[in-house]
Amino acid sequence: MESSRAQWTEARLDDLAERVTELDHRLTSQIDARFNSLDAKFDAKFDRLQQTLIVSMASVVLAFAAQIVFGG
């Protein structure tokens, strides 16, 4: 009787391990998708920030050049 119970327990543990593995794969893929989405959003925001900084720096350089040329 004890051996049949041990076999039943082993079978149930194997089933549980398989279900946990499937759940892990599903959760991992969902987490990866969310991180990829966040990466794309951050990349877009940093690209806009970089563009803004470049335009701002160009404006400052042009303002200084105008001050030197036209001698304010």
Image (cartoon, rainbow, N blue to C red):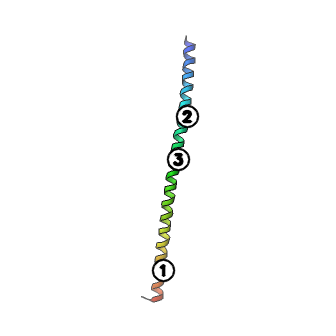
Most foreground residue, 6 or 26: 26
SS at badge 3:
helix
* Residue on which disc 2 sits: 22
SS class, disc 1: helix
The Cα atoms of the two marked residues, 1 and 2, are separated by 60 Å
List x then y, in percent, for residue 49: 47, 65
Tell me which label, 1 or 2, sits earlier in the chain: 2
| Quarter of the rendering occupied by the C terminus | bottom left
Residue at (51% x, 43% y) in the render:
30
Q: Amino acid at mark 2?
A: Glu
Q: Which mark is residue 33?
A: 3
In the rendered image of this protein, does residue 2 appear above or below residue 34? Answer: above
Q: Position of residue 32 (x, y in %)?
A: 53, 46
Disc tally is 3
Q: Amino acid at mark 1?
A: Leu
Mark nearer the N terminus (1 vs 3)? 3
Q: Residues within 10 Å of mark 3 (few under 14, many from 20)?
A: few
